[in-house]
Image (cartoon, rainbow, N blue to C red):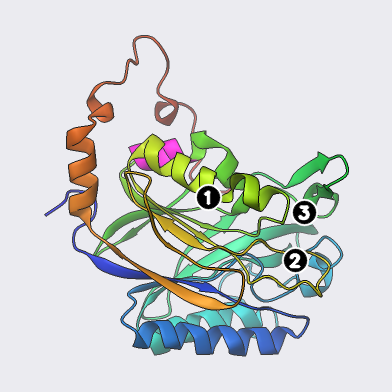
Amino acid sequence: MSNLLKKPFKLALVQLASGADKSLNLSRARDKVHEAASAGADIVVLPECFNSPYGCDFFPSYAETLLPSPPTKEQSPSFHALSAIASESKIYLVGGSIPELDTKTKKYYNTSLTFSPSGELLATHRKVHLFDIDIPGKITFKESEVLSPGNKVTILDLPEYGKIAIAICYDIRFPELATIAARQGCFALVYPGAFNLTTGPLHWKLLGQARAVDNQVYVALCSPARDLSAGYHAWGHSLVVDPMAQVLTEAGESEEIVYAELDGAKIDETRKGIPIYSQRRFDVYPDVSKGDVSYEDRV
């Protein structure tokens, strides 16, 4: 038995087609998660901003209040929908992300909620690195015009399987977060994300493979389906990468569910063959996981 991943399991990524109707998005997510569970998935992942269109213009109008937790159904219909879906399906559900409003601070966040098979909230991750880019002639986007960043590494322990880390989209570009999670014993890094038609073909798969090979863990990236009638065009191509950086499964552009079998033996085999965990030179450079790492949100 692997020390990191206690037993094999089936992972499902739901590349959801979302629109302007939040209630319809939640209903569609429910149907697709149930479909994945019926196909034998043990852990299911939804995409970034699965309950709304993606964009700074939409964050405030779709935002829900999550604190104090648990919120009421009126404060957060998405929270209660995700909890119910996980409980009905008897699976672990990484609920993509939703826009969040903290009513005390009046700040908006891009927030991921993970639920247990009993519908219990296990973890909350607010996107740490905001998507502020300007590629001349291609795309300009600035999440920080509306959103505030989270400020913690999010790791949760699934008793049957082991530890996973949750981060969101642009977070994948920062290897420190992934490295810290891996050195804290995570067997997988899970990123709901929504790369676009500029950065997607350039870096989406590359970054998934980079984080996997850097840390010799599984990496999962879950995108919304592409909708060319929307203001923001998601790349799609949800995928799972193994610890040797091999792509196990990859979606196309449209709505679909992709599956992968994750096995701890692959992690052990990779680390035995290429033993970087025992070869690092912390006498030459620092171990970022031993620094001042935040695992709790600071208000």
Numbered disc in front, either 2 or 3: 2
Mark 2 crowdedness (10 Å alpha carbons): few <14, some 14-19, many ≥20: many
Q: Image quadrant of residue 168?
A: bottom right
Picture quarter with the N terminus: bottom left
Whether residue 208 is visible to the viewer of this picture, yes or no, is yes
Three-letter residue code for mark 3: Leu
Q: Is residue 223 above or below residue 281?
A: below
Residue span colored magenta: 178-183
Three-letter residue code for mark 1: Lys
Q: State the separation of the CA atoms marked 1 and 3.
A: 26 Å
Q: Which residue is mark 3?
A: 147
Instruction: Return the x and y of residue 186 as percentages of the image width and height.
Output: 34, 48
Instruction: Return the x and y of residue 237 as percentages of the image width and height.
Output: 56, 62
Q: Earlier in the sequence, mark 2 or mark 3?
A: 2
Query: Circle 3 sits in a helix, a strand or a loop, which is it?
Result: loop
Q: Is residue 30 above or below residue 205?
A: below
Q: Which residue is mark 2?
A: 54
Helix, strand or loop for the magenta stretch, by majority: helix
